[in-house]
Amino acid sequence: KNEVEQSPQNLTAQEGEFITINCSYSVGISALHWLQQHPGGGIVSLFMLSSGKKKHGRLIATINIQEKHSSLHITASHPRDSAVYICAVRGWVGGNQFYFGTGTSLTVIP
Amino acid sequence: EPEVTQTPSHQVTQMGQEVILRCVPISNHLYFYWYRQILGQKVEFLVSFYNNEISEKSEIFDDQFSVERPDGSNFTLKIRSTKLEDSAMYFCASSAARDSNYGYTFGSGTRLTVV
């Protein structure tokens, strides 16, 4: 079983700030998933990556396989980015089971 | 934009009763998943389904749970005899491939309350 740690647990930012959320895991992985959970509970998948960096709009996800670490960056943050951001990792290549972190609760203040 | 649809949005059931949670995945997706989230806790993987069979299941997914794709469009999760600790939000998700750039598409969830 993979232990997934996220930091910080809670984050408050001013609108426009650059935000970084971190995810560390204990065992080698085949994929890492970043998700966003809205205040109403709905989940949106942001990225799935196994190496390097991905960008979509104002969101950037990076992963360092050697250091067992991933970061999610939000540029020019906006109040609508307020949500819980969750990191999840998948172990062996043939598997489907993701292990989830507890999430980082982000509040962006106007 | 295509959606994963889950019904009902909220279900209350008595302990010991059977419940069926329903999901309609995106039509051209091949991989289907169920997750649960107990209030205030992490999301947990329950089961993945591909090619009309379970491809992987977690320790949570014991004999009380089963999944089916009865008609090529619906994907159901059945809990045979519900317990209080089954109270949670259950999310269905689907994906076109096991590894997809943007991950999976999630439904909006079914909140199950066992009383």
Image (cartoon, coloured by chain):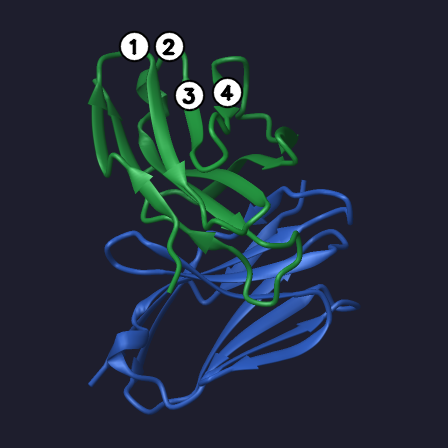
Chain colours: A blue, B green
Mark before the other along the chain sequence, 2 or 4: 4
Q: CA distance from mark 1 to mark 3?
A: 11 Å
Q: Which residue is mark 2?
A: B81
Left or right of B106? Residue B110 is left
Q: Nearer the viewer, residue B27 or A60?
A: B27
Q: CA distance from mark 2 to mark 1?
A: 5 Å
Q: Is residue B44 visible?
A: yes
Res. B71 mark: none
Which of the image's four quarters has the C terminus of chain A? bottom left
Q: Are marks 2 and 4 in contact (CB under 8 Å)?
A: no
Res. B78 mark: 3
Q: Does A61 appear above or below A29?
A: below
Mark before the other along the chain sequence, 3 or 4: 4
Q: Which residue is mark 1?
A: B17
| Whether labels 2 and 4 share one chain | yes
Which of the image's four quarters has the N terminus of chain A? top right
Residue lying at 31% horizontally and 27% vertically, measured from the top left = B87
Q: Which residue is mark 4?
A: B66
Amino acid at circle 3? Lys
Identify the image quadrant of residue B18.
top left
Amino acid at circle 2? Ser
Q: Does A79 appear above or below A87?
A: below
Q: Is residue B37 visible?
A: no
Q: Are marks 3 and 4 in contact (CB under 8 Å)?
A: yes
Residue lying at 76% horizontally and 67% vertically, measured from the top left = A65
Q: Are marks 2 and 1 in contact (CB under 8 Å)?
A: yes
Left or right of A89? Residue B66 is left
Question: Extreme front residue here?
Answer: B71
Amino acid at circle 1? Gln
